[in-house]
Amino acid sequence: MTTPPLAPSGNSAAQAGPTLVGIGAQKCASTFIHAALGAHPDAAVSDPKELDFFSAYFDRGYQWYRSHFSHGTDKTVRFEASPSYFYDPRCPDRLNAFDPNIKVICLLRDPVTRAYSNHLHEVIKGHIPPLPFHDGLANNPAYLEQGFYSRHLGRWLDTLGHDRVLVLLAEEISADPVAAAQTVYRFAGLDDSHSSPVLHERRNESDRARLPALRSLLRAGGDQLRKAGLEDSLARLKSTKPVSAVLRANSQNMRDVVPPLRDSDIADLRSCFAEDLRQLPALLGRDSLPWESWAAVTR
């Protein structure tokens, strides 16, 4: 069996590839972190946000992956976020072999609310109709698999070590997004005094467009402004009354479309995640977690 070639040695891979990678889990504020780094003058982010290289597209090779960062070779930090990396057991070793200096940001959220948000996401994407959660779960075991945080995070910590992994909780990001962005900036080696209106935007809510063509048009315009380095100007534009009114009018909250979790769903999910949850604080160096699921299993 032929041994595959190693990643280029020295600084060549690091100069053209990422210095920082977000690994999820899915629906845990990765879009906010991507935007916060995209707004920093000394950072560059991949386009698209999720490259899924170490999970789905590893066969495309290192050069394909590095090509997504060619616009940021003059930046201190280059970033991409692919939640699929978190629970794919192949990814820690693959990332470490590509560049043993890459740092990782891991985002977590109450696993019960994350699973329901995952279901809403699948409906929004059109992968399934607006079924009740239990029907979606019967179709998609990843709702559960992504929520075994101790199991998956343990692999990353074993491979990269604690110094190269920053874990943030989505609930704490939502409570103080500016402080969360500053934590990310410090971890990445960036000036943490940078401020941007982008940090105050709400992102990736569980909604779908009433007029998809309108949303596509607006997003295309926004993408052009971002590529021109006008992320802050875009955030200010979106906060103006006329634009924000259009955005709200074109938004349909999926929680009004998809039935909420039943009490039995919540109980089943908490039971499923209980043992994994009990192990998580020790991995994070915390005494407790700010989650209803944690409170329920430790009563």
Image (tube, grey):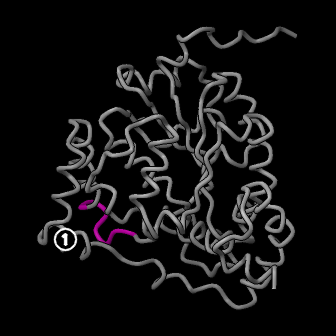
**Quadrant of the image for the N terminus?**
top right
Queried whether the magenta region covers residue 71, the answer comes back as no
Look at the image and give the residue range highlighted in magenta.
Answer: 208-214
Q: Is residue 167 left or right of residue 196?
A: right
Rendered position, 226 above or below 24? above
The image quadrant that residue 274 belongs to is: bottom right
**Pointer 1 local density, CA inside 10 Å: few below 14, some 14–19, many at least 20:** few
In this view of the protein, which residue sits in the foreground, 2 or 285? Answer: 285
Q: In this view, which residue lies farthest toward the bottom?
A: 263
- The residue at 53%/35% (across/down) is 20
Rendered position, 283 above or below 281? above
The image quadrant that residue 148 belongs to is: bottom right
Task: Please state which amino acid type lies under the numbered disc 1.
Answer: Val
Q: Residue 90, image x and y in percent?
A: 76, 36
Q: Residue 184, image x and y in percent?
A: 48, 46
Q: Is residue 27 left or right of residue 298?
A: left
Queried whether the magenta region covers residue 211, the answer comes back as yes
Rendered position, 137 above or below 49? below
- The residue at 53%/25% (across/down) is 65
- The residue at 49%/61% (across/down) is 125
Q: In this view, which residue lies farthest toward the left?
A: 242
Q: Which residue is mark 1?
A: 246
Q: Residue 131, image x and y in percent?
A: 60, 78
In this view of the protein, which residue sits in the foreground, 110 or 69? Answer: 110
All told, the count of numbered labels is: 1
Determine the secondary structure under disc 1: helix
**Quadrant of the image for the C terminus?**
bottom right
Q: Is residue 126 left or right of residue 277?
A: left
